[in-house]
Image: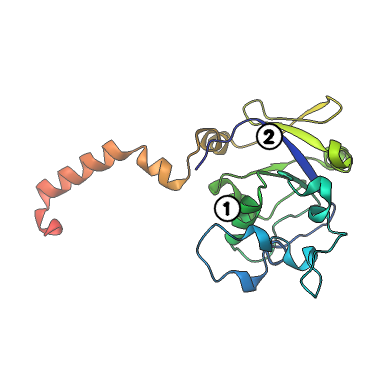
Amino acid sequence: MKKFETFTGIAAPLAIRNVDTDMIIPKQFLKTIKREGLGVHLFDEMRYLDDGSENPDFVLNKPAYRKAQIIVAGDNFGCGSSREHAPWALNDFGISVIISTSFADIFYNNSFKNGMLPIRVDQETLDKLMDDAERGANARLTIDLENQTISGPDGGSVHFDIDPFRKHCLLEGLDDIGLTQQKADKIETFEDKQKASQPWLFG
């Protein structure tokens, strides 16, 4: 997993409450276990018309937001079924940060495990960031995870809270496998002791 670094990116406003995981990536696209290629189906039912053409009214189809890296969303983002394909699709599109007042727990946890930063803010802060995101080509926010700040295009900055362990994992690029690999020496020592005391387990 890549280390999460400070960056400035385009923020897309998605002022919709209760965006569920089926809206993020509809069930018909869950047949793959690959993380690549899902971005084209992100928000499929809102992003495309019945004939398959792009819906020009959907935010990510607008020229200013086609390369958005941040989504500023309504309350309770990621609710619904617990599909890991949801953060995969967001990641594949290029989204690194989602800002909302609240997230569904499973989606929130899955986001961190896939190198994406979900940021909880209060409603007043969300309203301000939503206003910033609606500036089109100037809708750029700077996310500084180390200092836990979001800076807007007008130079203003707000602080956000995050669990210290999750922050550490993102900054160091550690998923569950990476965390396990950090304990490789202890694992090897345990295995050596077990081989010596219970050799029949190892054939």
Q: What label does residue 110 carry, if any? A: 1
Looking at the image, residue 114 lies above or below residue 149: below
Q: Position of residue 101 (x, y in %)?
A: 77, 46
Looking at the image, residue 84 lies above or below residue 156: below
Q: Position of residue 23 (x, y in %)?
A: 73, 65
Q: Position of residue 22 (x, y in %)?
A: 69, 67
Q: What label does residue 161 carry, if any? A: 2
Please name whichever residue, 59 or 163, is drawn nearer the observer in this view of the structure. 59
Mark 2 residue element: loop
Q: Badge 2: how crowded within 10 Å, few (<14), some, or many (20+)? A: few
Residue ID at (83%, 38%): 139
Give the quadrant of the C terminus.
bottom left
Q: Check the image and tell me how it is coloured.
A: rainbow
* Mark 2 or mark 1: whose residue is earlier in sequence: 1
Please name whichever residue, 112 or 193, is drawn nearer the observer in this view of the structure. 112
Q: Badge 1: how crowded within 10 Å, few (<14), some, or many (20+)? A: some
Residue ID at (76%, 60%): 19
Left of 31 or right of it: where is 177? left
Q: Which quadrant of the view contains residue 185? A: top left
Q: Which quadrant of the view contains residue 119? A: top right
Residue ID at (58%, 50%): 109
Residue ID at (61%, 45%): 116
Left of 50 or right of it: where is 93? left
Front position among marks 2 and 1: 1
Mark 1 residue element: helix
- Between the C-alphas of marks 2 and 1, the distance is 18 Å
Left of 86 or right of it: where is 185? left
The amino acid sitting under disc 2 is: Asp
